[in-house]
Image: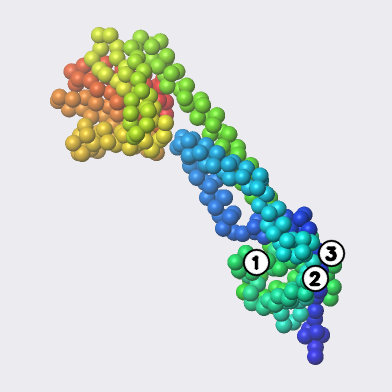
Amino acid sequence: MSDENKKEFRSTYTLDYNKYKEFSKGFIATNKSNIIVCFFIIILFILYLVTHNYSYIILFGIVFAIIWGITKITGRNKLSYKRSKSLNNDKDPETTVIINNEKIIGTSKKGDVANYEFNQIIGIVETNNFIILKLKYNVGIIIDKSNITGGTKEELIQFLLDKCINLKKKKVIQSKKWLITRKVILVLSIIMFVLAIVLSVLKQNEIDKYAEKLQQNNYNVEIQITQYNGRDTEKLTITKDSEYFWGYLYDFSRDDYAKRNIEYWVKSETDNDIKDEYVIEDSINYEKYVIKDVDRYAIFIRKDNYVFHGIGYPEYSESLDNIVDFIENEILKK
């Protein structure tokens, strides 16, 4: 029999609470689906920040904080560890793992034996103290690096890479890198959560500042709360003595609400016939429509979550043009 066929590695571990936490974190951290979800959340947060939909970020942050708090209070890792310990006469489980040319054998101190085939192994993870062999259904085999016999850690890893034909990647995954990635994503998420709260608070006072600026320029302004999209919406009604126009500035809080309403109003004004000549600008953050013919003159402007709707008379177009210039240059700046 060749030396290769006689090859046998052996390692024994005692799974106390600290080692259980290391195993759990190392195993979960390398779960690719978790990382993909985290990156997806970061992209969503960035999108919501850009589109000024801060409420989504704040809501998600609150829900996440509640779940995280419940997990910490209940101590999920500790509960799982205690359950494992209770199955071993309330002692820390001790297991010897033998890896030979044919299979992997795990034998507990109680005498329970578990056999695994090499083709069951789908991943190899390395933590500070362990080599973890990942199987399907969140099952893992622990190998303590501190007491490997039959060869070095490097020889064992190479042996496993050669034997485990169903590995998703023919390399050892370092849990430390994945844990750092998760922490970076968490820090970025917290920063964006705090930023969303700050920007949301600042936005609440923004329309009051707009009203003050309009009044300082001799416009009459009335602040109202109206219902749009099933929620309270701040609205400024703008007029000026001896001028023939009516202006309305709405704060819809969210870009998508503003976009939905300006599209509805423009379609209503044009009887669903929005001609190219009416569209002055149409971008993600800024829209402007000018509808002018013999008997009507209307201008619609959207900047982010704000919509201005101006109504005037063709024969007195200068009045509406003046307020629109002020709105574009002083209020809804591009």
Residue at 48% from the left image edge and 36% from the top image edge: 55
Outermost residue, bottom direction? Answer: 1
Q: Is residue 166 visible?
A: yes
Identify the mark nearer the N-term, 2 or 3. 2
Q: Residue 308: x percent and y percent?
A: 33, 26
Where is mark 2, residue-wise?
109
Front-lying residue, 333 or 188? 188
Q: What amino acid is found at the position of numbered circle 3 in the picture? A: Ser
* Distance (Cα) linking label 2 and label 1: 20 Å
Q: Secondary structure at mark 2?
A: loop
Q: What amino acid is found at the position of numbered circle 2 in the picture? A: Lys
* Distance (Cα) linking label 3 and label 1: 22 Å
Q: What amino acid is found at the position of numbered circle 1 in the picture? A: Val
Residue at 35% from the left image edge and 9% from the top image edge: 218
- Quarter of image, res 139: bottom right
Task: In the rendered structure, find residue 22 and report the number of the disc placed on it.
Answer: none
Residue at 64% from the left image edge and 77% from the top image edge: 119
Q: Is residue 154 visible?
A: no
Q: Residue 14: x percent and y percent?
A: 80, 63
Where is mark 1, residue-wise?
139
Q: How many marks?
A: 3
Graded by Cα atoms within 10 Å as few (under 14), some (14 to 19) or many (20 or more), the crowding at tag 1 reads few
Identify the mark nearer the N-term, 3 or 1. 1
